[in-house]
Image (cartoon, rainbow, N blue to C red):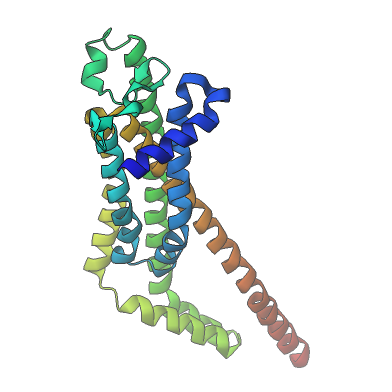
Amino acid sequence: MSVFTHLVAELGRLLEPVLAQSATAAAIVLFTVLVRLALHPLSRAAFRGATPVAGCLPVLLQLPVFFVMYHAFSSAEVGGKANELLGHRLFAAPLGSRWTEALGEGGLFGAQGLVFLGLFAAIAVVAAWSAVRGRRAAAVAAEAAAAAAAAPKKAAAAKKAGAPKRAGAGAGAGAGVMAEVSAEQQEVMRKLGGVLPLLSFGTLITAAVVPLAAGLYLVTTTAWSVAERAWLQYRKERAQERSEQPAEQAAEQSVDGGVRSSL
């Protein structure tokens, strides 16, 4: 833990000329970003794998960092010396203070209370963003399942219309993959897709009971997770669009060639 406190203290000193008393708070945010950058390859692999175990790995690896952050701003001494981090602030609120302590120093709308309200508002915005994206992803997955279920009919219609065989084979393969997922499993996935995003709001409860510094870590890493997943999803969709365009062009050329030969 002494290594962590030394690193955060040094980052705070570098930022102090610009951010004054809030430099250590900015150092915590910067430290969190560095941790998430180091974990980005694992997050990218988890996104591609799309398995629950792989998706939990980046979160599990962050737990030790969070606990170190928690203890660093909860302990009066570090390495037998007074903990210098406890004297640092984010505006009017000490980084080692909790929401209940802030309420006793001026109430809900006191100087310290307003800092915590700003933190809670930021967490709520990130959680709402995560919930919206989660529900949208669940809706897309449901549409994909419905499209795959209708794939055999489309393949038969395309075969009658004289479409290329390769297109029918691809549709049949997609239907085969979705056939492995039962209707009950699809319903469970749909329900989980609607409930799991709401768990992001649980971060508000955690931020209310941990030191302010740990709350800063939570809002930063949560915002990073949502933004990172949005970026990875965007790149995946762009890659799919680029890969589908040549296939569509080839299918159109084959249909045009069949029409011309019949004429």
The x and y percentages for residue 229 are 46, 53
User: Which residue occupies the foreground of this view, 103 or 15?
Assistant: 15
The x and y percentages for residue 244 are 61, 72
Place residue 49 in its image quadrant.
Answer: bottom left
The x and y percentages for residue 235 are 56, 60
Single out the residue that lies furthest toward the bottom.
261
The quadrant of the rendering that contains the N terminus is top left
- Residue at point 42% right, 48% down? 225
- Residue at point 37% right, 33% down? 216
Left or right: 256 as drawn, with respect to 111: right
Q: Does any portion of residue 210 appear in the rendered image? A: no
User: Which residue occupies the foreground of this view, 165 or 48?
Assistant: 48
Left or right: 163 as drawn, with respect to 192: right
Q: Does any portion of residue 237 appear in the rendered image? A: yes
So how many labels did they put on this image?
0
Above-or-below relation of 14 to 255 = above
